[in-house]
Amino acid sequence: MEGLFYPESVAVLGASTKPGKIGYALFKNLVEGGFRGRVYPVNVKGGAIDGRRVYRSLSELPEVPDLLIVAIPARAVPGALEEAGRLGIRRAIVISAGFSEVGEEGRRLEEELVRVARRHNILLVGPNCLGIYNSENKLCSIFNPMDRQRFPGPGSIALLSQSGALGAAMLDWMADMGLGMSKFVSYGNAALLEERHFVEYLAQDPKTRVIALYIEGVKDGKAFMETARKVAARKPILVIKAGRSSEGAAAASSHTGSMAGSFEVYEGAFRQSGILYTRSLREFFVMAKALSMLEPPSGPRVGIVTNGGGMGVLTTDAVIEGGLEIARFSEGTVEEFERLVRAGKLPEHGAYNNPVDILGDARPETYEEAMRVVLSDPGVDMVVLIVIAVAPTLRPDLPQRLSHLVGKKPVVGIIPGSDFAKSMARGLEDMGIPVYETPEEAVVALRALYDYGRIRKKLSSGTGP
Amino acid sequence: MEGLFYPESVAVLGASTKPGKIGYALFKNLVEGGFRGRVYPVNVKGGAIDGRRVYRSLSELPEVPDLLIVAIPARAVPGALEEAGRLGIRRAIVISAGFSEVGEEGRRLEEELVRVARRHNILLVGPNCLGIYNSENKLCSIFNPMDRQRFPGPGSIALLSQSGALGAAMLDWMADMGLGMSKFVSYGNAALLEERHFVEYLAQDPKTRVIALYIEGVKDGKAFMETARKVAARKPILVIKAGRSSEGAAAASSHTGSMAGSFEVYEGAFRQSGILYTRSLREFFVMAKALSMLEPPSGPRVGIVTNGGGMGVLTTDAVIEGGLEIARFSEGTVEEFERLVRAGKLPEHGAYNNPVDILGDARPETYEEAMRVVLSDPGVDMVVLIVIAVAPTLRPDLPQRLSHLVGKKPVVGIIPGSDFAKSMARGLEDMGIPVYETPEEAVVALRALYDYGRIRKKLSSGTGP
């Protein structure tokens, strides 16, 4: 499996010399995207792409490639894979569509493909997929043009998507949101390698901290849930499942052929297997970001520090409505706040119950004092840091000011706004504080961390989630 | 009231010659922000700001200004307002803090302020507020530095915020999201002019299409709800209320002194008055955008057109879970789709039930055919247009291709992604199609339109919502 994600040599069967063709973009994206391994274009027509010789057949290649990417018409794929197998190729990503997703004839073709793969012990991804993106070595089998398709930078979110188009859009969106990724797999029809095989691989991948999946249905539900239960004790698994309503299930069946089944059954299975799940695509990424950056809190009690009272109130509501608790400060904390107000280090008219409101003219030093006190309260399990960035007294050094306080308890930020707000948010994220634009998203993030902490504890102790 | 938003002359009392001071930024923002009226800085110390003479008192001014903006210490404000009243000034925004929000002494000061204002018939905004931003004439009493505070461009969303800091952050965020605004009011302690007075003004403001409010509590609940009920028959009123939980209510009471009261009572009152409300800050803007751009649909039935199956399935689920319906296509529509597939204008393996999936290699012409058919189905009340923008066959002319189809029924878009996706989204928004990044947000938008349609119908027919 390692060789699927870290091949040293890749052949692209169906590489095209014609710009605009999928086989052209596929080859270009691999070479120009920064992949450092050896890449061989293969096409019966021969010729050259940007001065590189195109091999007329796999047998002409100077070596047996670690990975074969296939983008030729479906009917020719089984034969090509047969040849690849004979040559000793053991890994293939079949991009080509026209298999079980298009009806009976395609289904027979897919069965033939699987027989060939099994006969030659070929690890097969697809068919009808976008394949793999690995942010570490820039292995990329995605054929969308680079002028519109962006890829996330290195990070610890792994993404598996049953839908290729949605998967590609999610990559592009993640890049825009600044979310870092370890590996991406669009596995298409999952004729041989299924979601659970990738989950198992990612569980032991040191670059991956959270495994996020978009699914409509799984091939083998029981096996998937068993795998998930094992993996979730070590790494969070996060799922967004489509086809929850009967109307959605009908649409899913015509899309991926998934028998979506009752969502209640899925929900129960997710819960039993320790899988975190959401119905919202935005929450999916809100949760993935938090889980990729932070460890779970030791309890449900939230402390809030803000320079804007209104956002503090909204966040308080969101905490309660999200099933978490507003921490009650200890006597020591109350006294420390009183002392700091007397010393002129915190504003007289601020609020020092939870939420702590250090007012609109708070400076980075004010934040530092308030955050220090709140983080050291034994009754606070995690903290929301709210920054109304347009306030005149804030300075860009706020993140540095807080850096020595971060790391012991989970902290998430709320900073809505434009350029200055975004640069402040980036500064905090570089320090390991995930930042969101709204109270409800910050709370969804904290709740996911809290839930995962409980899941991991229960799965590790063997009592089930 | 018109003169509050459209003054021809403004005096800034407390204008400062010192960069970094609030009174300096206030004056600079007004002059450099593009306000074309006459602006007079006033400060007992005299001097000059950027070569402009600073008047030592209001009585020195060459004319009686239409509007006075006050940013001097609280204890001096009632006296200053007394002088202003004697001079014939009839409108004032008091930015200064230190009134009822800081305790008993401040409360007495505020009562005095109100007495002065009433005696001289002065329309008073504040105190303890940011005041007004008018995108049309660039009147601006917000003192945040321009290097961090952005303002939304012209548009039809009016925003009222009980919280100044949150209000400013919302302006900055709206600018970043590309949401257009008519007018903004941060009314602070609402000592004289309350939220309902602004709602009444905005109801007849031709630039305003939706009135959005952030509130923790309202001064006079009964009067507010009566006003809302009258206004909602003509324009949508959208509320996000903080202090819903008892913990949040306690925080609100220390923030704005609002007696938040039971949220159930508020919810009931909102419903009776025809007010749309949400608990989510993101949904607040999702709804505001749709309500500012589209008319309500005539029913709950949604059509979906997509080039990505997965996003189509997620959207189908969101429609059902959002309380709307997936439209069933008429026989005529089914036949028309069959004809177009036979004619090669729509792909053979596409899906032509609702959602309509025109597949990953759809071109703008394909979208045009599918959208035309779906929009003309009599059983479709509104449409979700999904664009996976990274697909190779899409071209930037998609918006133009669809322009002749838009306007009869509400259409919202879903386009997540980075630069190319965003430019596509902007193109559609310029045509009047609000675009979102996720299915759930598109559905929240449609649901708000649908709900408002029912509210308007019932309030207009006099049967109550």
Image (cartoon, coloured by chain):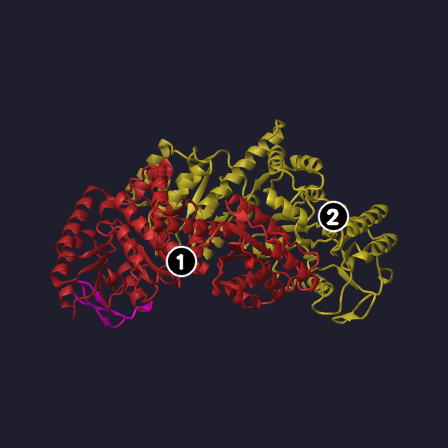
Chain colours: A yellow, B red
Nearer to me, B27 or A86: A86
Q: In the figure, is residue A373 to the left or right of B304?
A: left
Q: Quadrant of the C terminus of chain A?
A: top right
Asked if B115 appears above or below A262 in the picture, the reply is below
Q: Which mark is residue B88?
A: none
Q: Which residue matches tag 2?
A: A2
Residue A160 on image: x %, y %: 65, 48
Residue B51 on image: x %, y %: 25, 73
Give the residue type that dot 2 points to. Glu
Q: Which residue matches tag 1?
A: B172
Residue range highlighted in magenta: B32-57
Give the residue type that dot 1 points to. Asp
The answer to whether residue B183 shows anywhere in this view is yes
Furthest residue toward front: B331
For disc 1, the neighbor class at 10 Å (few under 14, some 14 to 19, many from 20) is many
- Chain holding disc 1: B
Magenta region, mostly helix, strand or loop?
A: loop
Let me know if marks 2 and 1 both belong to one chain. no
Q: In the figure, is residue B40 to the left or right of A181?
A: left
Q: Secondary structure at mark 2?
A: helix
Residue A201 on image: x %, y %: 70, 43
> Pointer 2 and pointer 1: residues touching (CB < 8 Å)?
no
Nearer to me, B368 or A354: B368
Q: Is residue B14 magenta?
A: no
Residue A222, by quadrant, is top right
Q: Is residue B54 magenta?
A: yes
Nearer to me, A103 or B311: A103
